[in-house]
């Protein structure tokens, strides 16, 4: 009978190898090996069959000295690859064979090959050298990039590699095991291009930082057609009768007018509304933190409350400045203060509803999504508009997924979600609900926009007021008046819609309801 030893795998340097086997007697009964010891383990290196002279770093897994957990015929050993009593024996880029020798089965001495393994010498993901080399991949502005696919080669070609592909961590770093020589760096990340780069590893020079990533925006402009900004730009230019070719006003200038018009229109809508349009922001109470910065566009706070699993709301309000029990919770400028963490509860999620007096900078572009569909990372370069750099700028704004392109696409639908938190340093927005289905693409883009929280009926109103402002500045009184009349008519329709939407009891047809006497019990 010929026994072919199993290949145990390609192991990380410094890790441990575990080998298990069962032993049987002549009648196929489970039988215990007699006299098994670490000195019976022999390890050979590469095709030269160089034998390790030391027996250190090996351990029997037999808890009772004969069988694992007392199970007859079950045996095992562990091999510590970080034990280099024989200097350099366990090294990256080598193959090994494990031999179990001089064990007794039914009174006979037997030898057998337990298995073979390698140390970072197969998929060459980690490299084939002995020296740890750390690469930090950053943008041209010096920002570390996570999620970058990185591979290196000893020749200046993207095909083939001596190490990789590995993915950068949150610090933009990957570590390869390489030889001391010159290597060329190749990278890939959606929405980025990477400049050519190389490094030469040597004694005392094993860490390299490469500022080679430049953000790009590309893809089909057709996906932006349903964007608030795209529609607004078309409407404004149409209202002011401005040509697209040799236009007097740039897109950025018109977008600035749209942003200013939006907040005025929103205030007009809220003026006589019992249930005004408000922004919701979630704040999680953290250990030792009693001050929380709200977005710069906060006007007045409408409500602060927490909810339980059943949806019950517990409202919070500040006490007087001189109250002997303390103020509890209060607002100073854009900063929300709580008296202490214990008064709220560590980890509590406070919902702050506030009426905006401004709007975060609007824009559209391409983005990436987390696997759970709740975290969006905006591209560093936008297609239209401006990326807002204020703290928590987009908390309370609306994320609108415009569509997805590529060879293999999932979730190519128009979806909207509220943004509950925003990190301006990483450009990551947290959504209140996961996108469903979660948009994915293999070689395309996910298109999005930051939209004002208004329906399409108000889009027209905002565009009309922006056009009115432009015509007023130009002194075109006749056109400005006609645009203002159209604006007032559209705004009236928005107010009526809001009125009927917020009536405590919607109109009903009495002839077809329980109000009709024919349906009442006598």
Image (tube, rainbow, N blue to C red):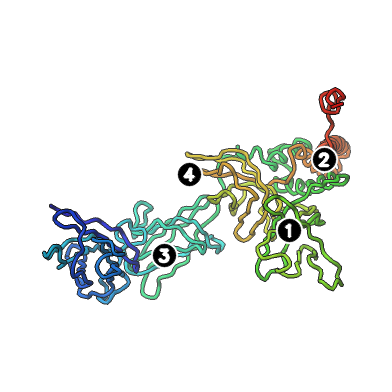
Name the quarter where the C terminus is drawn. Answer: top right
Residue that numbered label 1 is attached to: 295
Q: Are marks 3 and 4 in contact (CB under 8 Å)?
A: no
Residue that numbered label 4 is attached to: 442
Residue that numbered label 2 is attached to: 502
At horizontal 18% and vertical 68% (from top left) the residue drawn is 34
Q: CA distance from mark 3 to mark 4?
A: 26 Å
Residue 394 sits above or below residue 172 on the image: above
SS assignment at label 3: strand
Q: CA distance from mark 1 to mark 2?
A: 27 Å
- The spot of residue 102 in percent (x, y) is 14, 68
Report which quarter residue 114 is drawn in.
bottom left
Furthest residue toward front? 522
Query: Is residue 486 visible to us here?
Result: no
The numbered mark, 3 or 4, whose residue comes first in the sequence reads 3
The numbered mark, 3 or 2, whose residue comes first in the sequence reads 3
Is 296 on the left or on the right of 184, as rendered? Answer: right
At horizontal 31% and vertical 59% (from top left) the residue drawn is 10
SS assignment at label 1: loop
Furthest residue toward left? 108
Which disc, if any, is residue 222? none
Report which quarter residue 324 is drawn in.
bottom right
Q: CA distance from mark 1 to mark 4?
A: 35 Å
Residue that numbered label 3 is attached to: 175
The numbered mark, 1 or 4, whose residue comes first in the sequence reads 1
- The spot of residue 170 in percent (x, y) is 52, 62
SS assignment at label 4: loop
Is 194 on the left or on the right of 24, as rendered? Answer: right
Disc 1 packing (10 Å; few <14; some 14–19; many ≥20) = many
Is 240 on the left or on the right of 55, as rendered? Answer: right
């Amino acid at each position: 009978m010929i026994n072919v030893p199993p290949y145990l795998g390609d192991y990380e340097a410094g890790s441990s190898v575990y080998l298990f086997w069962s032993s049987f007697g002549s009648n196929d009964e489970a039988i215990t090996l007699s006299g098994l010891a670490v000195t019976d383990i022999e390890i050979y290196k590469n095709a030269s069959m160089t034998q390790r002279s030391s027996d250190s770093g090996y351990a029997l897994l037999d808890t009772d000295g004969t069988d694992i957990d007392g199970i007859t015929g079950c045996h095992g050993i562990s091999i510590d690859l970080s034990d280099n009593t024989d200097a350099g024996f366990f090294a990256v880029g080598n193959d090994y064979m494990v031999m179990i020798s001089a064990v007794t089965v039914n009174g006979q001495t037997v030898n057998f090959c337990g298995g073979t393994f390698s140390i970072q010498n197969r998929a060459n993901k980690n490299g084939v050298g002995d020296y740890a080399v750390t690469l930090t991949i950053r943008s041209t502005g010096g920002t570390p990039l996570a999620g970058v696919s990185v591979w290196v080669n000893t020749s200046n070609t993207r095909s083939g590699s001596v190490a990789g592909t590995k993915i950068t961590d949150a610090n933009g770093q990957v570590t390869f095991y390489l030889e001391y020589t010159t290597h060329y760096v190749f990278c890939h990340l959606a929405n980025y291009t990477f400049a050519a780069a190389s490094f030469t590893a040597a004694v005392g020079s094993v860490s390299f930082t490469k500022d080679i990533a430049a953000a790009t925006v590309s893809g089909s402009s057709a996906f932006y057609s349903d964007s608030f900004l795209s529609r607004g730009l078309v409407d404004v230019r149409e209202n002011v009768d401005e040509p697209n070719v040799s236009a007097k006003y740039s897109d950025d200038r018109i977008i600035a007018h749209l942003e200013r018009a939006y907040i005025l229109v929103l205030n007009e809508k809220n003026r006589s509304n019992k249930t005004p349009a408000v922004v919701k922001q979630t704040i999680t109470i953290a250990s030792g933190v009693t001050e929380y910065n709200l977005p710069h566009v906060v006007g007045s706070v409408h409500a602060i409350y927490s909810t339980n699993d059943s949806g019950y709301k517990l409202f919070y309000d500040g006490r007087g400045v001189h109250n002997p029990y303390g103020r509890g919770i209060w607002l100073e400028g854009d900063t929300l203060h709580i008296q202490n963490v214990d008064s709220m509860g560590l980890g509590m999620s406070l919902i702050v509803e506030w009426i905006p007096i401004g709007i975060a900078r609007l824009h559209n572009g391409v983005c990436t999504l987390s696997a759970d569909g709740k975290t969006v990372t905006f591209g560093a370069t936008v297609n239209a508009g401006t990326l807002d750099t204020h703290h928590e700028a987009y908390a309370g704004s609306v994320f609108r997924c415009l569509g997805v392109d590529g060879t293999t696409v999932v979730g190519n639908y128009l979806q909207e979600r509220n943004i509950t938190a925003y990190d301006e340093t990483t450009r990551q927005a947290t959504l209140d609900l996961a996108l469903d289905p979660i948009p994915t693409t293999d070689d395309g883009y996910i298109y999005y926009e930051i939209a004002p929280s208004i329906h399409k009926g108000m889009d027209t109103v905002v565009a009309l007021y922006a056009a009115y402002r432009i015509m007023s500045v130009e002194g075109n009184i006749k056109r400005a008046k006609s645009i203002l009349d159209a604006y007032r008519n559209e705004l009236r329709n928005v107010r009526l819609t809001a009125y009927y939407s917020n009536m405590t009891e919607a109109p009903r047809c009495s002839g077809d309801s329980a109000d009709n006497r024919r349906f009442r019990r006598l």
